[in-house]
Image (tube, rainbow, N blue to C red):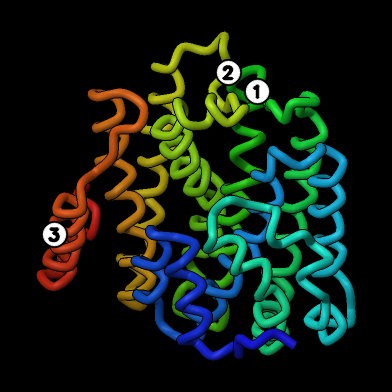
Amino acid sequence: MSPLTSSMANLDDLLVKTSRTFALTIPLLPEPTRREVTVAYLLFRIADTFEDASHWPRERRIAALVRFAELLEGDDLAAAAATSPADWGAAQASAHQGYVELLSEMPAVLEAFAALSAPARYGIRRHTARTARGMAEFVARTADDGTLVLDDVPDLQSYCYVVAGIVGEMLTELFVLERAALDPITPYLHARAARFGEALQLVNILKDSADDAREGRSYLPARVDRAEVFALARRDLAASAEYVHALQRAQAPRGLVEFTALPVLLARATLERVEGSGPGAKLTRPEVAAIVASMHRALDEERPAIPE
């Protein structure tokens, strides 16, 4: 059994070690959504780690992703939680120590997953497995040296859907779970959920394109003008802002508004920085802090969290 218990503090420790952005935003969520999203993020991060293991043979990455999906889809969660991390090659999957620790603590994360409510488990299980299997399909397209090349904008959007759009759909299901006040806007949110995820993924791809190329990933199609990708990201961010405005107008818990608004605000500012300064450009910590403070002021004063 893993030495890590599934207490919120220990899950938060893994969160901090594996994501700067989500470690900042997930604690804003109200319970039980906070715990549900924490567990979901860690499960998705496990799948991401297998997908990103470009130093592994293609077949090994595919096998790990498919096996992980089958583990989540299985009926015996207790048996899944007893899975030995050594079986997954945890020490060799990544050079990132946080990801290595997450893989070594997979039994505890699965234990926390098993303790969630049945409706939350259903959504997280279904969407995480969909993502893992979709990632396996893209890994199957990589060359022998691990290089992945996307062909055009629809191909880029398909990839973004697998790794981020599905996340947006899953989060939306968790947001509206047992919140009857959000029933009237649920279809509106679902219609924008995948584009929300696509927006954030596109900004990350544009920001990290130089690093990705050095690591054998080419998410920006060679025959597509980058201006077209920037324009798509801006349209998706506009749809994401509509999502946040709908939550705010429906008087959703403040934590839900903060959790969804902050990534959009940061992505908007990052997109402008990358467009002006090129790949690799990032917001400074003081700039991030100023954006967070501005959002909180707007909510305190009952103004839109994202300026309309």
Q: Amino acid at mark 1?
A: Leu
Element on which disc 2 rests: loop
**Kind of residue at disc 2:** Pro
Tag 1 secondary structure? loop
The quadrant where residue 22 appears: bottom left
* Neighbourhood count class around disc 1 (C-alpha, 10 Å): few under 14, some 14–19, many 20 upward: many
Residue visible at 51% across and 84% down?
A: 10
The location of residue 234, given as percent across then percent down, is: 36, 33
Tell me the tag on residue 150.
Answer: 1
| Comes first in the chain, label 1 or label 2 | 1
Residues under labels 3 and 1: Cα distance? 37 Å
In the picture shown, does residue 282 fall above or below 69? above
Q: Quick one: label 3 or label 1, which is nearer the N terminus?
A: 1
* Residue carrying label 2: 221
Label 3, secondary structure: give it: helix
- Asked if disc 1 and disc 2 are in contact, CB closer than 8 Å, the reply is yes
Q: Position of residue 92 (x, y in %)?
A: 70, 54
